[in-house]
Amino acid sequence: MNKRDHVINAVLLSVGISVLLSPPDAVDALVIFLTIAPPVILGALLPDLDTVFGVHRKTFHNVWVLGFIMLFPLVFGNLYYVWIGVLTHFTLDLLGNRYGMGLLYPLPGFYDIPVGVNVDSRLAGLVTLLVTAVELVFVYLIVAAGLEAHLAAPELVVFFRALLGPIIGV
């Protein structure tokens, strides 16, 4: 997929997660969105650093990078939600190109899902929306199972509420 599709996916996914994680209150949904969207968008764009450094769809498009990004918040206590963007980037690239990805790089081989579409296909936008919908179903199931703490970083929500509360009257 191209950068536009990755950003669209990240923004729509952030909106969906915000709605699913917030009580029925528009202010809470906005605060959660402002907490989630920047790192998810960052994560959605991060793997494409290998267009500048390394080999595209190899250097930053592998399970080792995803694992490092997933461990980062546990070790350093920041960069929550970035892993969601990286994972969705991988999903879109597997479904949105015919070349595959070096998922086990530096080990040899490219892996793909044979139902993918070309980046410049007129179906690329539709694939982006379908992938986003499926991702939101997974998020819904995580929230319904009571496991939303694995998605959310409550201390960030508290920070943004304190920061934005006086501005928006909460």
Image: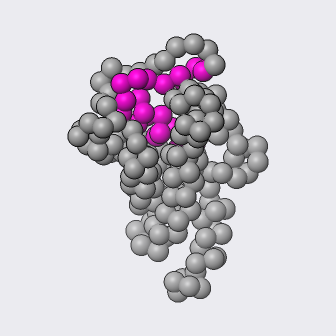
Return the residue nearer the eye: 10 or 143: 10
Question: Which range of residues does the magenta coloring cover?
Answer: 83-105
Percent of width and height locating residue 23: 45, 66
Percent of width and height locating residue 55: 57, 28
**Viewer can see residue 135:** no
Percent of width and height locating residue 68: 67, 35
Q: Name the residue located 29 percent from the left edge and 44 percent from the top edge.
A: 125
Return the residue nearer the eye: 146 or 6: 6
User: What scheme was used to colour the molecule?
Assistant: one colour
Q: Name the residue located 46 percent from the left edge and 19 percent from the top edge.
A: 111
Locate residue 114 relative to residue 157 in the image: left or right: left
Percent of width and height locating residue 167: 56, 85
Q: Name the residue located 43 percent from the left edge and 23 percent from the top edge.
A: 100
Against 13, is 134 above or below?
above
Q: Quadrant of the N terminus?
A: top left
Asked which quadrant contains residue 97, the reply is top left
Q: Name the residue located 48 percent from the left edge and 25 percent from the top edge.
A: 101
**Viewer can see residue 120:** yes
Return the residue nearer the eye: 60 or 113: 60
Q: Quadrant of the C terminus?
A: bottom right
Task: Give the farthest residue toward the front.
Answer: 52
Magenta-span inclusion, residue 9 = no
